[in-house]
Image (spheres, helix red, strand yellow):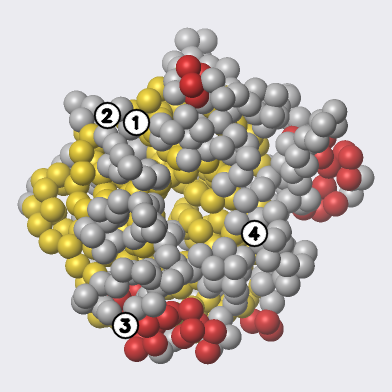
Amino acid sequence: MKEKILALPLYAVLTTLVYADAIDVNGPMKFKPIATSAYEQTTTDPLILNSKPWVIPEGFTQSIVSDENTLNIYPDSNDWGDMNTTNETGKHAGRYFYRTHEVRPASGVPFSGGAISIIDLKTGKSEILAQRADWEALDGLVWTPWQSLLFAEETIQAQLPDSDVPQAQSGLLYEIKFAKDDPTTVAEISVRPQLGSLSHEGIEWDEEGNVYVIDEDRKGSIYKFVPATFGDLSRGQLYALRVKNSAKTGEAEWVPIDMNQAQISARVAAQAVNATPFCRPEDLERIGNTLYAALTCEDATDPANINGPGAILAVQLSKTPKVSYFVQPGINVAFETKPTGTVAGITGFKSPDNLAKGPDGKLWIVEDNENSDIWVALPDENGDGYSDGVYLFASLKDQQAEGTGIYFGKDPKTLYVNVQHSGTGNDKTMAITRKKDKSSTED
């Protein structure tokens, strides 16, 4: 798609990429893209924001799964519900929904420690699964193939050290193991410092049992942990991604870093081997043999700029990794221009944050932006490294809020998404579901 768009003048690019009225994005979540971000539908009305905060395509409904009326973990501070996952492969697949809560200690604000909550999608009950006084800014969360739950702290400078890893300067990654056949009862929680002391968010794994993590820093790197034994994260080697020739894209390699330094600051260890810096890597998502990373402030045209519009990076997980920009403003999606006064805004891509694998292999992306948008990126079928189309699925009417933690569970026609920092003070987890199409039995 790159070569086709570069042949068009800028105005044509913006019009073609955003106002794709004739295009239907097919699949279980088949939809006609909405035309614009929710600039004109922004509101502070709690009746709207506490029930239908998203602008969504025709043929979809939105409903609350859980909000602070059913579970308010931090009634005296800012409750941030963030990433999430469900039990994908176990006995209770699709029934339970897990969330981390990205709360940070602050002077004068009561702090009980970070928490993981669990929602029973069958009964609707929400409760705390685990909480600890020294956990801060919990964010990343993923279910492993060996049926444990990984979660991590997103903090650059740790304020509350873990007594088992007191030397760690940043956040740490933890692993929950459950009681046999019971994903609601915690049997053991272990810290996994070998996966680095970092400002963690995205966590992903591959079929060989390797685990990928990021450092959410404006010069952050992407890491790969290779365990000594499949399913055992207590021993192994941490590597950092280094693109060859000091570039940001092209052929790359995974470079081993010093494991003693990694448990103090993996950022320092990565810099020592000239690992490639990216601008605030946040979430990770693997689809097939490709690892995608949301780069919130990346500027694909100026590597020195740490205040760019953001991009989605793709890393081919082959013997010789190959790195490319999969979604890049100005190439396969428009730059965003905010509305000012009487001048209309241009809907575009800015500050991508969380990623999800769609039921048919498309990449779903939610922004950390005002107004927060949800985009869908088609696979790269022509082999140029770029998504063959990036389309707007939803936009948040709550300008102060941020969509986060997007996820597909067992139902291929339901997207889960959190709304945090809500202007109403009522953060929530929502389901956006495609209605049954009576006119067609096949999508």
Alpha-carbon neighbours of circle 2 within 10 Å: few (<14), some, or many (≥20)? few
Which SS class for mark 3? loop
Alpha-carbon neighbours of circle 3 within 10 Å: few (<14), some, or many (≥20)? some
Q: Which residue is mark 4?
A: 297
The answer to which of marks 4 and 1 sits earlier in the sequence is 1
- Front disc: 4 or 1: 1
Q: Which mark is residue 154?
A: none
Residue reaching furthest to the left: 180
Q: Which residue is mark 3?
A: 167
* Residue located 59% across and 59% down the image: 295
| Residue 206 visible here | no
The answer to whether the residue labelled 1 contacts the one labelled 3, judged by CB atoms less than 8 Å apart, is no
Q: Which mark is residue 67?
A: 1
The answer to which of marks 1 and 3 sits earlier in the sequence is 1
Which SS class for mark 2? loop
Foreground residue, 158 or 289?
A: 158
